[in-house]
Image: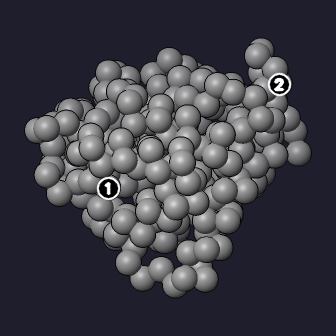
Amino acid sequence: MPRLHRPDGAELEWWVRGTGGPLVAISLMGLHPKAVCERFVEVLAADHRVLCYDLRGTGASSRTGPYDIATDAEDLAAVVEEAGGDALAVALGDGARRSVRAAAEHPEAIHTVVISGEFPLGRIGETGSQDALANSPAVLDALLGMLETDYRTGLRTMLTSSGESEWHERALRQRMEEMETHSPAEVGVPRMRSWIYDDSRTEGRALGDRLWYLHYPGNAWFQGSLEIVRRSLPEARFEAVSDGVISRPEENAAAIRRILAARRAAA
């Protein structure tokens, strides 16, 4: 697989599935191993070129920091440009922040960002939903402390408190092992800290209607935050789906096709 050499010495492994059609870049949550999105990539690759890559510090990319939103955004833009540019980015978790920053600063690389979920682009704050765990600084500080002192326990807490209450113990252990192998503590903790304290709402607003949310309920960390997101991003577009790209790949792939078709029609 090709490797992109960054100016600071980091090497990023990347690859493209599919041989024709528009370029779609997958911007996964830093903790997610690539396998979680495999079916979504497979469905889209039937008529798109789908770009995937390992963030610095994860998977087969080099363990070269820093691990923060700003650096990750520049890495994303560079990988997309290496693959030909003019991409739509599909973003999950902290991938939302890096994608809107990359698209705002490098519009020739990323023309549209589609966020899967209800992820705000800044801390929800006291005016946000009181149902969202991410609305509580104390909860977030406790999570960071847990990740720093016992990474696996922190990962378990994140998974079991997200709203997916049907975890089988064996499946839970397997997912935690995959996450820890893909993004070890020395990489995952600083990246999580950067996500918690980052604010990318200015970049999100700069995208205007180039920013989409394919939103669905269920994640307890951000439960009820959709209206906060709508108010902070007045020009963004929103479409309800039954679940995210991991659980409902075909439904979300169909939405991506509609978004790209609408862009072509408007051009």
Say left or right for 135 vs 108. Answer: left
Q: Quadrant of residue 113?
A: top left
Residue 5 lies in what quarter of the image? top right
Which residue is nearer to you in this view: 162 or 19?
Answer: 162
State the image coordinates of residue 112 (x, y, percent, origin top left). 46, 36
**Observer-nearest residue: 234 or 264?**
234
Per the model, the C-alpha gap separating discs 2 and 1 is 35 Å
Which residue appears at 61% of the width and 69% of the height?
175
Scheme by which the image is coloured: one colour
110 to 120, vertically: above or below: above
Residue ID for mark 1: 221
Q: Nearer the viewer, mark 2 or mark 1?
A: 1
Image coords of residue 47 (percent x, y): 66, 57
Query: Which residue is disc 2 drawn over?
Result: 5
Q: In the rendered view, does 254 fall on the left or right side of 142?
A: right
Point out the image quarter for the C terminus: top left
Which amino acid type is shown beneath numbered disc 2? His
The image shows residue 102, relative to residue 138, as above or below, that is: above
Task: Work out whether residue 49 can be spotted.
Answer: no
Please, what secondary structure does the residue beneath circle 1 have?
loop
Q: Which residue lies furthest to the right in this view?
A: 1
* Numbered disc 2: secondary structure: strand
Task: Name the residue rendered at 66%, 56% in the picture.
Answer: 180
What residue type is disc 1 on? Trp
Left or right, residue 237 beside residue 115? left
Residue at 30%, 49% (x, y): give it: 139
